[in-house]
Image: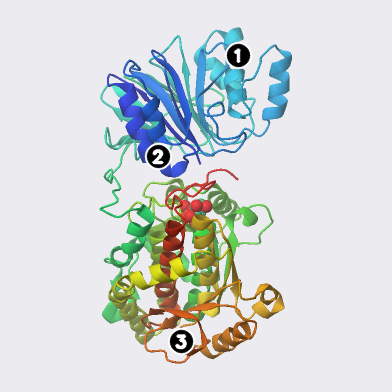
Amino acid sequence: MCGIFAYTGKKSAEEVLLDGLESLEYRGYDSAGIYIPEAGVIKTPGAVSELREKIPANFKGHSGIAHLRWATHGEPNEKNAHPHSGCTDDIWIVHNGIIENFKELKEKLEKAGHTFKTDTDTEVLAHLIEYHLQKERDFEKSVLAALNEVRGTYGIAVQYKEKPEMLIAARMGSPLVLGIGEDERFIASDASPILPHTKKVVFLEDGEVAIITPMEHKILKLDATQVKRAPEEIEWNAEKAQKNGYEHFMLKEIMEAQEVIKNTLRGRLIADKGMAKLGGLESVAKKLEDIERIIIVACGTAYYAALVGEYMLEEYAGIPVEVELGSEFRYRSPVLNQRTALIGISQSGETLDTLEAIREGKRRGALTLGIVNTVGSTIARETDAGVYNHAGPEIGVASTKAFISQLTALALFTIFFGRQRHMSKETGREIADALLELPEKIRSILERNERIKELAEKYANYRDFLFIGRKYNYPISFEGALKLKEVSYVHAEGCGAGEMKHGPIAMIDENFPTIAIATQDSVYEKMKSNIEEIKARKGPIIAVVNDGDTEIPKLVDDVMFVPKTLEMLSPILNVIPLQLFAYYFARKKGLNVDRPRNLAKSVTVE
Ligand code: G6P
């Protein structure tokens, strides 16, 4: 949540900073701001394009700090946009995270004569540094003294007007990368804005403070002792995401599903042997043989992928699996041991709740694994082992292609764990073959997207939707509903089809459509009965059915056809019409599909 970018060197800071902020826009777009000591500060509600428009030709300098905000404390207006300063406008700060004890610090500072201009927790930190600067007369010592008083999470970059070439950055719970160029240095929330300039980076750890000038940097702990860390070279390239002619990233990313599956599978299936080769798990393969229980932690869409994974792994690998929301797991007292594998699933690799759940699992002795899309992200670095999705950058805030890739990776995990245990070569081969057939089947769904568009437009005036599914498609009912509410702001509820009669069916009438995922699998007959129950209450029904099904189409108002596949892989196909339905529904309403209100792509606050 919130993106930070800071620069010091010889280039035009305003250009470097604005370009860099653009690649961080997935982290928030409520407001944006930039401070350049030689030029001043400019802030605006909205995203980088709005900020660009406000910048006059003479706004120039060689260092500066910039920020994109996802609001936590205070409305997303210009006043609350970062950077924030103290009373004298000498100290400026950009911050990602939450200062938990900001109220008590604010009271103390107000008593000392400080007056506050905004409703943010961040401003308190600017005043606190200023307060110490007035006593210490030393920038570095003042930042350290202030950080030793705050509780909470932060990734910060601070500048002092008197020392324009210097940046001070610090990390506690929010990611921060230091980029090392030739006579220039960068600080950013992730490596993407740094990569066009240099591949040499240092990933700061929690409790570390970097003192930076264009030619050098040093890293300190909060007690001022120095940390020695050699920079790393990152191998990946700055992939600048383009819409490639599509109106929105969301549609482009749904349309990438075939490629995504191929990329997730590439080099990882030995189909004739019915095996999965997961290089990222090799270092812990021996330990995984002794694993007796798996816990999967995730948030949002990744959580629904995890629920499908639970069905896959229990049915085919015979290992007990539990799935937990990161935000719940970390606050209870989970019972784990060395024979527990804790898998974190995260597109961004930065979701704080998932990360903290993984850390909690590690503290309690579990072996931690990751299924992560963003290379070099915190979860990827902190887990003991894992696999990358290789889905490419996902820009649309509503996750689509990453979900497809997460399900594919979970199928690979299922073959891997299953073959380590009792899964036969034949079964492994059957899953592998079915996986390899998916891209072609996806093509046939995507080719029929006009029909889904017509349906979305037909139903665009309804305000409530129920999504139902069973077994492997039970989690898909939740994911289908989540997609629709994320981008369209209508009420949509997922529900196990069997559970419907215990409450949700009370809502059904002719104004409350149901989307039923009813492909021909082991629970097909049961789904048919549930559809009949809704029909009897006059609820309109759209069903996702298999090509060639002649029964359900007769019962329902509308259908979305998908090809048949192995039951455990059916969620991968069935979710695609639901993603397209949500997309076209929101588009018909003229909403900002790629940037739904109030949401952010990467949530690094609790
Ligand atoms: C946010 C996004 C969701 C995403 C969730 C988990 O809420 O808006 O689309 O599913 O975070 O994100 P992660 O990066 O951990 O998969």
Residue occupied by mark 1: 132
What kind of element bears circle 2? Answer: loop
In the image, 257 versus 320, the foreground residue is: 257
Q: Position of residue 391 (x, y in %)?
A: 34, 58
Q: Would you say the beta carbon of the disc 2 residue lies within 8 angstroms of ligand 1?
A: no
Q: Position of residue 58 (x, y in %)?
A: 33, 15
Decide if residue 59 is in sight here: yes
Q: Nearer the viewer, mark 2 or mark 1?
A: 2
Q: Would residue 14 appear left or right of 558 to someone viewing this image?
A: left
**Image: 120 above or below 378:** above
Q: Earlier in the sequence, mark 1 or mark 3?
A: 1
**Image: 190 above or below 523:** above
- Which label belongs to residue 24? 2
Q: Amino acid at mark 3?
A: Pro
What residue lies at 34% left-to-right and 40% top-to-bottom? Answer: 192
What kind of element bears circle 1? Answer: helix
What kind of element bears circle 3? Answer: helix
**Image: 480 above or below 193:** below
Q: Nearer the viewer, mark 2 or mark 3?
A: 3
Q: Earlier in the sequence, mark 2 or mark 1?
A: 2
- Which label belongs to residue 553? 3
Q: Amino acid at mark 2?
A: Leu
Q: Amino acid at mark 1?
A: His
In the image, 78 versus 348, the foreground residue is: 78
Q: Earlier in the sequence, mark 2 or mark 3?
A: 2
Q: Position of residue 297 (x, y in %)?
A: 55, 59
